[in-house]
Amino acid sequence: MDNMNLNKHISGQFNAELDDIRNHVLAMGGLVERQLEQALDAIANLDAELAQRVIEGDHKVNGMEVAIDEECARIIAKRQPAASDLRLVLAISKTITDLERIGDACVKIAKVALEKRLKKQQPLLVSLDSMGRHATRFLHGTLDALARMDADAAFALHKEDAKLDKEYEGTIRQLMTYMMEDPRSIPEVFDVLWATRAVERVGDRCQNICEYIIYYVKGKDVRHVSYEEMEKDLNL
C-alpha cells in the first residue's frame, strides 16, 4: 500500500471511529431522555414500580459514560486529533458528563415518587409536572441539535434555560405559599421541592450541552457569555 492509499485508509478509520463515538453519545442521550420521561410519569402517577425501574436503570447510564469517556481518551492518545476533530472529542467528553448528571436528576425525581405520603397532596404535583414536561422538550431539542451539530438550534435552545428558571421560581413560590397556608403539608412540600430542583438542574445541563455544540461548530467558548455577545461573536 503506497503512502497516499495508507493515509486515506488511516483517515477513513479515524472518521469511522468519530462516527462511532457520536452514535454512542446519542444512544446515551436517548436512554437519559427515556429515564426523564419515566421519572416524571412515575411521580405524576406515584408509580413506585416505574420509579424503581428508573433508579435501577441508572447503572446503564453510568456504564455508558465510562465506556465513552474511555473511547475519547483512546482516540486522543492514538490519533492525536487537531482542530475540529479535537473539538468534537472534547465536546463529547463534556456532554456525557452532563448527560450522566441528568441521569442522576432522574433518580432524584424517581425517589420522590416512592414517597407514599404524597398521595394526599396530588395538587402539589401539577406545577412540577408542567415544568418537567418543559425540561423534557428542552432535552429532546438539545439532543436533536447534538445529532445534527446545529449551532443555530443550540443557540435558540440555550435561551430555554432562562424560561425554565422562571418557571422554577414560580413553582417554588407556589409551594412556599402552600406550606405557609397548611404547615401540616411541610414534609410533602419538601419532597416536591427536592424533585423540582432536580428538574431545574436538567435545564442547566441542557444549556451546557448547547454550549458544547456551539464550541464544536464555531470554535468559540461561549460559557459565561451574554446572548448579545454570543450573537455578535458567532454571527448567529
Image: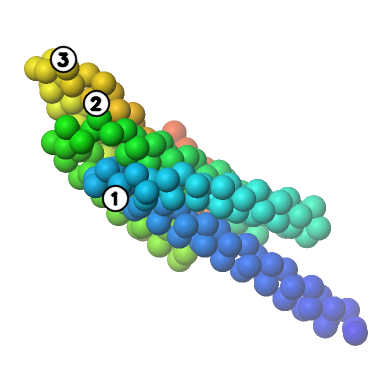
The amino acid type, in three-letter code, at marker 1 is: Asp
Quadrant for the C terminus in the image: bottom left
Quadrant of the rendered image containing residue 228: top left
Near mark 3 (Cα within 10 A), the count class, few <14, some 14-19 or many ≥20, is few
Q: Position of residue 69 (x, y in %)?
A: 66, 50
Q: Position of residue 193 (x, y in %)?
A: 28, 28
Q: Earlier in the sequence, mark 1 or mark 3?
A: 1
Q: How far apart are the two marked residues, 1 and 3, measured between alpha carbons? A: 27 Å
Residue holding disc 3: 183
Q: Is residue 161 above or below residue 140?
A: above
Please say if the residues under marks 3 and 2 sit with CB atoms less than 8 Å apart: no
Badge number at residue 188: 2
123 above or below 139? above
Q: Secondary structure at mark 3?
A: helix
Labels 1 and 3 touching (C-beta < 8 A):
no
Which quadrant, please, contains the N terminus? bottom right
Q: Is residue 29 left or right of residue 199?
A: right
Mark 1 or 2, nearer chain start:
1
Mark 1 lies on residue: 41
Amino acid at circle 3: Pro
| Color style of the picture | rainbow
What x and y, as percent, mark residue 41? Answer: 29, 50
Circles 1, 2 touching at the beta carbon (< 8 Å)? no
Q: Left or right? Give the position of 233 relative to 215.
A: left
| Of the pair 97 and 216, the residue shown nearer to us | 97
Label 2 residue SS: helix
Q: CA distance from mark 1 to mark 2?
A: 18 Å
